């Protein structure tokens, strides 16, 4: 009996220990619905943290509505977008793989735990759900461990985002130089100038006359840049044309006359001429010889900040002879691609040409002057008949057809306010732009076309911008003749790859990135060729 008693004692002790361990589980079983709701609440908090971090990352590239839709639906088609994937990869940089792994782990853990806890809020209507309820007390500890893991993964995702932000801020500070003020000044001047010419040009010579303004790209690099242009009068019936006037602009800041002086307040008007918003620019007034003194003003246009845009006769700071340009023919740059490069332009001047186009884009983008299609079709040069382009780079220009009216028309009926630039002739219809971006994977049409133009200059052959993007990229890969920096410049413009989520030229950071990388690299390359004597 003693032996039996000794045997029972350990069994009783084991049973008591088992009951002690089972008691909290029985308590959980009794309150399983309450326990499940608590676990679900903790899971919901971690799910919200996950979606919040993911949304912050997506908002760098997407609008709030799309970002919100995506964090609640991982089957959203935007998740398959290659551009979005590329932008996130640029943003995360070396942490991209870790980011993907973290997001995948969080998503799977949350989905799995949600599935396991889903029975807790349902009525027990089957033996299967009853079995799940009975299993729940014995899995609570496992669920708690899952929730702790989610907390760790969410903290890791937040750390990855903050590290990416820090790297992005450092890269922006380190790489991007401020865009020179004269670039934006030139853009403002040329926008006002285009609007002025379109709304105030008049001609009384009768029907059959066309008028063209030719804006030279060789504006000065001054704080208030000087802009040169030709005004062209063409008589269609006689198939003849005359370049009536070479014109340049100057921006002057008007200071009010001091009260203690007797200076005439209209003193500056005697030199600046008439207010062109109140008067028509009559074609006959432009029939002046280019040798006329530059001080002879054609009139002025009021700008913001008490400034005036004054138009003068003649060209300023231009190497080409003004009188000679009156007689020369104009041809688009794309015309010169039909001839071997060695007969047309030197390698050094090809780089100079590409640099001029990039600078001009920064000065004239989103204006009625700058085209959305291939720039080589719209940028012209004055030709001397030799077929050689190197000596004509100083004469590169954009043109605009002017809608002149009779001088008897009241100027007040013609708006001189800058209109929506997307209505300009050089702009593609919005539908075609959207189709191009969707069909060919283009991120920014202006930069893409400029990159294709640099590609054509580098290869000296025609390349259609509407071609397959992969085919164009393969052409970029063999663009080695002008050096790696030139090839990288073309590639980055085509891909709009500047380490930023933004793809719009209205974003100052993007313009600064283009200036800091593309312009600086091409200028350095040009300088190296110059000092080497090539």
Image (tube, rainbow, N blue to C red):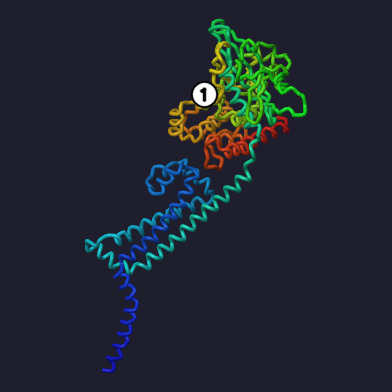
Of residues 465 and 461, the one drawn nearer to the viewer in this rendering: 465
Among the 4 quarters of the image, the one containing residue 395:
top right
Q: Residue furthest left?
A: 126
Q: Observer-nearest residue: 385 or 6?
A: 6
Left or right: 354 in relation to 121 = right
| Mark 1 neighbour density, 10 Å: few (under 14) some (14–19) many (20 or more) | some
Task: Give percent across and percent down for residue 225.
Answer: 67, 28
Which quadrant would the C terminus be assigned to in this image? top right
Look at the picture and state if 374 lies above or below 288: below
Quadrant that contains the N terminus: bottom left
Q: Is residue 336 visible?
A: no
**With respect to residue 130, does 305 lie above or below?**
above
Q: Dot 1 corresponds to which residue?
A: 424
Image x and y of residue 175, in percent: 62, 43
Q: Position of residue 30 (x, y in %)?
A: 29, 70
Determine which quarter of the picture holds residue 323. top right
The furthest residue to the right: 261
As displayed, is residue 392 above or below residue 236?
below
Residue farthest toward the top in the current orientation of the protein? 238
Q: Is residue 305 something one can see in this rendering? A: yes
530 relative position to 131: left or right: right
Residue 520 in percent (x, y) is at: 65, 36
Q: How many marks?
A: 1
């Amino acid at each position: 009996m003693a032996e039996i008693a000794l045997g029972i004692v350990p069994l009783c002790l084991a049973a008591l220990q088992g009951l002690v361990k089972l008691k909290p589980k029985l308590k959980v079983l009794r309150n399983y619905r309450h326990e499940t709701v608590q676990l679900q609440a903790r899971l919901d908090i971690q799910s919200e943290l996950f979606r919040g971090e993911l949304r912050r990352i997506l908002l760098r590239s997407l609008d709030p509505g799309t970002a919100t839709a995506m964090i609640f639906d991982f089957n959203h088609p935007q998740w398959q977008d290659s551009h979005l994937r590329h932008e996130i990869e640029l943003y995360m940089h070396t942490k991209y793989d870790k980011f993907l792994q973290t997001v995948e782990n969080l998503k799977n853990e949350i989905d799995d735990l949600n599935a396991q806890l889903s029975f807790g809020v349902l009525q027990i209507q089957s033996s299967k759900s009853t079995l799940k309820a009975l299993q729940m007390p014995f899995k609570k500890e496992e669920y708690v461990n899952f929730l702790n893991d989610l907390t760790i993964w969410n903290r890791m995702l937040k750390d990855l985002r903050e590290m990416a932000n820090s790297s992005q801020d450092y890269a922006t500070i380190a790489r991007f130089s401020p865009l020179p003020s004269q670039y934006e000044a030139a853009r403002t001047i040329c926008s006002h100038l285009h609007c002025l010419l379109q709304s105030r040009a008049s001609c009384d010579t009768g029907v059959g006359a066309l008028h063209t303004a030719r804006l030279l790209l060789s504006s000065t690099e001054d704080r208030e840049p000087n802009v040169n242009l030709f005004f062209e009068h063409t008589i269609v019936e006689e198939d003849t044309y005359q370049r009536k006037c070479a014109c340049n602009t100057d921006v002057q800041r008007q200071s009010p006359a001091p009260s203690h002086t007797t200076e005439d307040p209209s003193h500056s008007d005697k030199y600046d001429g008439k207010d062109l918003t109140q008067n028509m620019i009559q074609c006959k007034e432009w029939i002046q010889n280019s040798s006329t003194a530059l001080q002879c003003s054609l009139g002025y246009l009021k700008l913001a900040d008490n400034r005036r845009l004054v138009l003068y006769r003649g060209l300023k700071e231009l190497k080409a002879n003004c009188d000679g340009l009156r007689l020369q023919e104009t041809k688009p740059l794309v015309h010169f691609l039909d001839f071997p490069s060695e007969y047309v332009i030197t390698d050094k001047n090809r780089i100079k040409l590409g640099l001029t186009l990039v600078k001009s884009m920064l000065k004239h983008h989103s204006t009625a002057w700058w085209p959305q299609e291939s720039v080589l079709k719209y940028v012209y040069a004055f030709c001397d008949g030799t077929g050689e382009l190197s000596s004509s780079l100083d004469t590169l220009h954009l043109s605009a057809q002017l809608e002149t009216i009779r001088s008897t028309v009241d100027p007040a009926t013609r708006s001189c306010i800058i209109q929506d630039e997307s209505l300009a002739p050089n702009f593609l219809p919005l539908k075609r732009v959207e189709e191009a971006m969707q069909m060919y994977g283009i991120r920014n049409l202006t930069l893409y076309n400029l990159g294709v133009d640099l590609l054509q200059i580098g290869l000296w052959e025609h390349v259609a911008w509407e071609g397959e993007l992969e085919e164009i990229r393969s052409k970029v890969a063999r663009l080695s003749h002008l050096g790696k920096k030139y090839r990288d410049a073309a590639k980055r413009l085509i891909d709009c790859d500047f380490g930023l989520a933004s793809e719009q030229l209205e974003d100052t950071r993007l313009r600064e990135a283009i200036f800091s990388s593309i312009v600086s690299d091409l200028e350095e390359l040009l300088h190296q060729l110059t000092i080497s004597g090539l």
